[in-house]
Image (cartoon, rainbow, N blue to C red):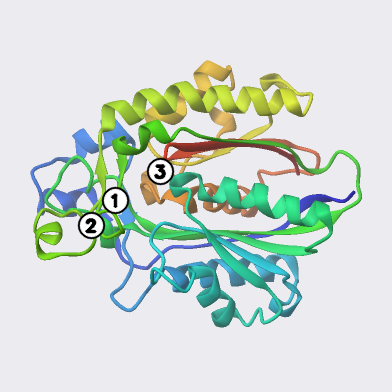
Amino acid sequence: MPNSIVLGTGSYAPERTLTNADLERMVATNSDWIVSRTGIMERHVAADHEATSDLAAAAARKALESAGVSAADVDMIIVGTVTGDTPTPSCAAYVQNLIGARNAFCFDVAAACAGSIYGLTIADQFIRSGMARRALVIGAETLSRFVDWTNRETCVLFGDAAGAMLLGATEEEGHGLLAATLRTDGSMTGILGIFGGGSRRPVSPDMLEDNGNKIKMRGREVYKVATRLLPEVVAETLAKAGLSPDDVDHVICHQANQRIIESALDTLGVPREKCWINIDRYGNTSSASMPISLDEASRAGRLKRGDVIAMMAIGAGMTWGGAVLRW
């Protein structure tokens, strides 16, 4: 049975940046407060003409280019997103058309910030079963369209971007994705989400008036859950792969909050310098942040053949997961 390996990576962020200084002029906040609590200094915001599929397609093209693979040779496209262009069709279908991947079947995964790690694990199963040879896994979000810019607790956190991973089959023993763990706890749906605009609370004047279509978050609860569950799922996944935290060369993770990342690393006993951190430049880009981090670390020459990479992400649902791969 083949294993799946990362053939190429890509990422894209909109040109416009929104700095903490910009936010100081928009809402009652200040840069020192934002940095001390989140680590964020700026975030990217999509232009009016850019939809989530545009960001995703740009990242996908870069992943294909880095792998030297044609879009026509892609068998499947998975997009992790909660901010698709439309409720239906899927964002992945729009991406397929934009990049010319005419032979790929496509679907979205709505696992919030864990979307990319869910997509990675799903694609791995298709490759292992032989149903796909090459799979594009993309995390892409335009969260700026769903932020309440009057709420200083949430508007400072989120940004727009996309990251992509092209997976392929390998017969080489001990390389590629070694193990993964996915988890969901639906009892925590209320602590983070966009609770209006669906079948439970359809679009209406009342829903729009109270910003029901904007991100709502109980920050302290999210922090407590994330700092407990992320190190647990990484340790469990490492054990599945027959490895320990001491074997980890790099950590590639969802960039939700720098304090969450540092807490998880400290609990695992993994030195902070092993983790690629870019939250200062992007903010929380949800499903996009993990593949963006992988792409940046790869292009910076940080990842060497044989390196063990631990991955982790957590988001609304609550959904979370861990993955371990050998580069």
Task: Check disc 3 and report its element: helix, strand or loop.
Answer: helix
Question: Which amino acid lies under the numbered mark 1 shown in the image of this protein?
Answer: Ile
In the image, 167 versus 69, the foreground residue is 167
Q: Which of marks 3 and 1 is nearer the N terminus?
A: 1
> Is 196 or 148 nearer to us in this picture?
196
Which residue occupies 66% across, 43% down?
302
What residue sits right under mark 2 in the picture? 213
Give the alpha-carbon distance from disc 2 to disc 1, as whole Å.
6 Å
Q: Report x, y in % for residue 260.
A: 41, 28
Q: What residue type is labelled 2?
A: Asn
Up-down relation of residue 55 to residue 326 (above or below): below
Q: Which class describes the residues within 10 Å of circle 1: few (<14), some (14-19), or many (20+)?
A: some
Could you tell me which residue is drawn at 64 percent across and 50 percent down? 120
Q: Where is residue 88 in the image (x, y as percent from the top left)?
A: 43, 72
Kindly report the distance in space between the C-alpha atoms of the residues bearing marks 2 and 3: 25 Å
Residue 279 is left or right of residue 221, and the answer is right
Q: Residue at x 56, y 82 (%)?
A: 97
Assess disc 2: are there few (<14), some (14-19) or many (≥20) residues with their C-alpha within 10 Å of its C-alpha.
many
Q: In this view, does 197 lie to the left or right of 82?
A: left
Q: Tell me the tag on residue 194.
A: 1
Q: Quadrant of the C terminus?
A: top right
Left or right, residue 4 beside residue 65: right
CB under 8 Å between discs 2 and 1: yes
The residue beneath circle 3 is 279
